[in-house]
Amino acid sequence: MAAERVFIEPAEIAERLGISVAAVYRYLNAGVIPSRRLDHRILVHRADFERWCREGNAEKDERKKDENSLIEKLLAGEIELELVIRARKNNARLLGISDGREERRNQ
């Protein structure tokens, strides 16, 4: 029985998150995914990554509840559509989700 490695490779992170390896490196360099540097290498401790995944999922669940609450208020006529759209865009930015328009504007 093989022992589980202490550090996790970017390719494994990409597979687990369903994103590209390049996106993983962007998140690592931006400090989104917890990591440590050793010379030119980026090391991701497996326990730190697991904790980050658990905490991130809890935060996403809370944001989803908030978003659903806004939609319910919209349907009840308690708030305006613009507020819901703005909240959804803010949540997408917090999650690091982009439709690509921002990246194209910066090129």
Image (cartoon, grey):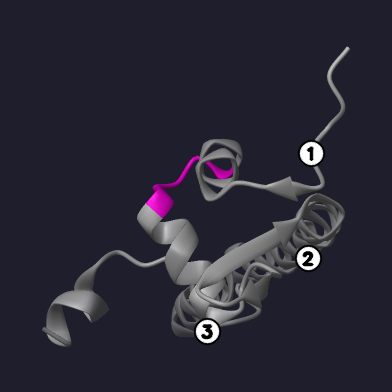
* Picture coordinates of residue 85, whole percent (x, y): 45, 76
Q: CA distance from mark 3 to mark 2?
A: 20 Å
The residue that label 3 is drawn on is 83
The residue that label 1 is drawn on is 5
Q: Nearer the viewer, residue 61 or 71?
A: 61
Quarter of the C terminus within the rendering: bottom left
Q: Quadrant of residue 49?
A: bottom right
Main secondary-structure element of the magenta-colored stretch:
loop
Q: Secondary structure at mark 3?
A: helix
Q: CA distance from mark 1 to mark 2?
A: 27 Å
**What's drawn in magenta, residue-wise?**
17-21
Q: Is residue 96 among what the camera can see?
A: no
Q: Say left or right for 36 vs 10.
A: right
Q: CA distance from mark 1 to mark 3?
A: 46 Å
Tag of residue 59 = 2
Q: Is residue 80 above or below residue 47?
A: below
